[in-house]
Amino acid sequence: MRLTDMPTEILCEILCLLPPCMILKCVTVSRTWHKTILASPALQYVVQLWKDGLVPGHDSSSSSDKSRALDERRRAWANLAWTSQTVVGMPRLSSCRAFELRSGILAIQYRGPDFSTLPLQDLDSDAPVHTHDLGIDMEQFEDFTIDPPQDLLVVFLHSAPGQAGLVFETLSDHQPHPLARCPTITFPAGNIRPVLSSIQIADDVIGASVFKEGRFSLCFWNWRQGEWLAESSGRKTPSHFRFISSRAFIEAVPRGNGCINICIIDAEDGCEGARIIQIATLRLPELSTGYSLTFAGVHGGACCHRPMPKRPFFSADARRIYLLHLQYNYSELWTRLFVHHRTLYEYVSRYERDGPYQPLDVPWEDWGPQQTRLLHGDDYGWAGHTYGERVVLPIGDSIQLLDFNPAIVGPPESSEAVAEEENGLHAAPSTLDEPFENPVATYLPYRSTMRRVDENLGVFFLDQDHIIGTNTLEDKFTVFAF
């Protein structure tokens, strides 16, 4: 029997095992395969998930129902046509020490003892805000992160003079986490408190910016084993970094013209711990005389290796956009540089495929123009406004959503979207003159959608299914669900 003559039932079973991009290529094999793929709800759902940058989670619905729900969701996001809008009473954002929005849970540590969590699924106006005292002196508290699919809360604190610690608890009931061999990890740290310190989690790895011995270091641990992994030290200021996998990260470097370092955490054979290997440096555009990059923050959605229970899908790690928030000469001159995960991770894949080599030093012209989008920016630098391939920003009295999903084309359809020149697909290059030596053109396509809101919302957060809007001076949050 020829492969193209295979019974439809068997063909569908085989095709469902292929990556979605391969399924699309199979459409061209024969008319029979074309009809089979178009007629199979299961295959169509797999392809539609891939187009939206999603991977399947837990859902017992039929493929037809799931595809229909996915299509409605896609249209809602494309038009900023949220399906519900709920106001939740919570203390104002200006009174918080740190916050995190991940996997449908908003968590906030306030300046007082209250640690609050708000589940966003099936939200209504009477939804309870869960408040708990972590039992930590707020003079010692530095930062926290959460990973709801692992039911994990990690608190970063200064436990004693010259010492810091990471505390691992369950997010649900604040007990020592059962997967953590050591409920608390302690390590040396300087008495000077970090500014803009950060802690991140990617599956079994924790990373933190730590001040010790007069310098800042990036430190990494395996939280499940309670083991020290590696350290990258010698920085004058806290490093802004972002995991691109559980063993690789990027670092934004604000020196001179600026650059992005791509590093991996590599275990050495026969040795305890690991080492940090810088595998590539991506240079940013050359600046005019008298300009230098003085701040570089990096934003992006967290790594997600598993879905929340009873969720039909979750965002694929490979479908993320990273935003570099760049300031020049400590002035009001800002830009935003957008770069896709695939561009950065290609260097990790190349290293893993070809083996060790000298670190690559890549000029801007060799990587940046075709694979990034550089736009004028401002001082809006709140964390949490980037998720998946989307970025949400406040523009006057409107919400602006930038979508870098390459499968999305065309303008918004809804009349509710703001009729602005900014709306629609942006495939033509953007060109910026200041502060660069030569005009900088960038080509990464994206779609912009704007919609006015009645409330005075100046800060927005974003996750897979929600936009959260807030005014830092009001004791309420507005949750827009899609």
Image (cartoon, rainbow, N blue to C red):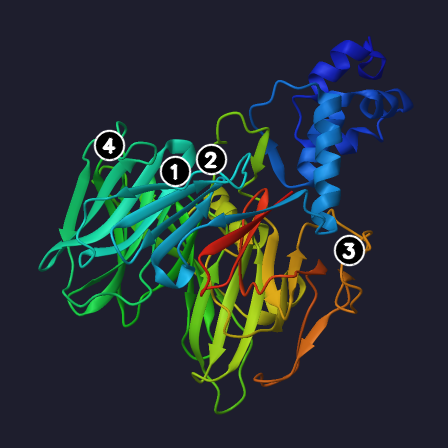
3 or 1: mark nearer the eye: 3
Residue to which mark 4 is pinned: 175
Which label sits on residue 416?
A: 3
Q: Distance between the Cα atoms at labels 2 and 4?
A: 23 Å
From the image, which quarter does the C terminus lie in? top right
Residue that lies at the very extreme toward the front in this rendered image:
126
Q: Amino acid at mark 1?
A: Asp
x then y, percent, for residue 303: 46, 43
x then y, percent, for residue 24: 77, 33
2 or 3: mark nearer the eye: 3
Q: Are marks 2 and 1 in contact (CB under 8 Å)?
A: yes
Residue 54 in view in this figure: yes
In terms of sequence position, does the residue under pointer 2 or pointer 3 come before the other?
A: 2
Which label sits on residue 305?
A: 2
Between residue 410 and residue 126, name the one nearer to us. 126
Residue to which mark 1 is pinned: 203
| Residue at x-position 41% and y-position 48% | 248
